[in-house]
Amino acid sequence: MHLYDTARQAVVPFEPGPVVTVYTCGITPYDAAHLGHAAVYLTFDVLSRRLADRGHEARCVRNVTDVDDDILRRARELGVHYLDLAAEEMARFDADMSALGLLPVTSEPRATSAIPDILSLIGISLETGHAYLSGGAVYFDVTTFPGWGKVSHLGEAEMLRLAAENGGNPDDPAKRHPLDFVLWQPSLADEPAWESRWGPGRPGWHIECSALAMRELGSTVDLHGGGRDLVFPHHECETAQSESATGHQFVRHWLHVGLVGLGGRKMSKSLGNLVFVGDLLKEWEPAAIRLALLAHHYRTDWDWSDADLPAAAERLERWRRAPEPPAAPERGRDDGAGDGGGLAEVRERLDDDLDAPGALRALDGRATGGESVARGAALLGVRI
């Protein structure tokens, strides 16, 4: 299997051991899941299916950021407790992902469950000189980490721009360097707070994922990723604080998914240009929605179109009109039937940087030729 590695900026062999540890950055549950979310988690679902098909045990962790600026702001606007908001939105998210046929992840831990782990990690950062106290908050000092920038490969000007767009507040006068980031911050009067050696407060965004990833999967993770918009600052910051604390490589392989847009702009809650999974499920078969997303390579940015779902539904019907696959071979027999139904072609395409669009085209060819594509479709998570 070959996959693109963001940090190495190349398609490289992915050769994990029998057990593969995978960490995916999950949602901040303050609104419904949209197609950008679905594209990310579907990518990791297909990867997990192929890893299992290759004989690996994939241990997949997808966190829930149930305390941060966004969810606290939304809970304040609605006049509800932030954990009640998180519970309601997580129930909707889980239902949507299940409807799309995503396999359950091994673990779905919440940020609020990791406060002791977060405090321990911050303590190590302070003791080793990688963090400092200032203005009642604890900051990570990026100048102390020699590998700063090795995930994103961005220049400082671009880092500053992205940090400002993502709540990094480069102009914070309490910082030693504009790109230093918050590990612990004082809570506002109406925000949750936990006791710490540095005063009551709550964790910063980035430290939550480091603590959860290492608690659930160990100090080094085989594969970590999420949407491309998380490369900087989130994953750059995760790497710096994790490797500074442990002295070990944090992630062996970084995988990032392209952004889904609408009207030429990335789908985002702040812009309001969203297509919600739950709304599509009211009108379209889940398998068709899954196929519409798989028609785009995971690494590309693309715009959602009203034509995507009709095209996917038509493809699904073509596949269904193909004949049923032959019976599976008896145990101990090897007559090649095990790779029938398009299975061999799908395996080949997925091993080439998760080329799901290529797999779909291969199955189209088989179906047009009057052959079954059931087994290949099943590996993609599509029941026909």
Image: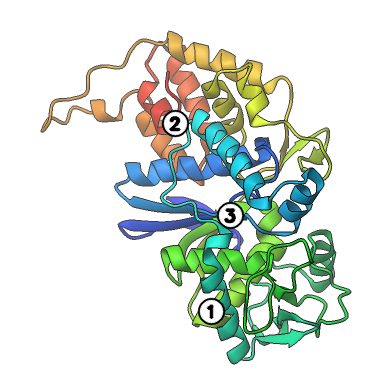
The residue wearing badge 3 is 25
Residue 150: x and y, percent?
64, 72
Closer to us: 81 or 51 = 81
For residue 298, above or below residue 366 = below
Query: Which three-letter amino acid code belongs to the residue tagged 1?
Result: Ser
Binning the other alpha carbons within 10 Å of mark 3 as few (below 14), some (14 to 19) or many (20 upward) gives many
Q: Residue drawn at (56%, 69%), measured in percent from left and top? A: 115
| Image quadrant where residue 188 sits | bottom right
Query: Which three-letter amino acid code belongs to the residue tagged 3?
Result: Cys
Circle nearer the N terminus (1, 2): 1
Question: From the viewer's perspective, is 13 left or right of 41?
Answer: left
The residue wearing badge 2 is 381
For residue 23, above or below residue 318 = below
Binning the other alpha carbons within 10 Å of mark 2 as few (below 14), some (14 to 19) or many (20 upward) gives many
For residue 243, above or below residue 89 = below
Question: From the viewer's perspective, is 190 left or right of 343?
Answer: right
Residue 291: x and y, percent?
55, 26
Which element is circle 3 on? loop
Closer to us: 264 or 121 = 121
Q: How far apart are marks 1 and 2 (CA)?
A: 40 Å
Q: Distance between the residues labelled 3 and 2?
A: 21 Å
Which element is circle 2 on? loop
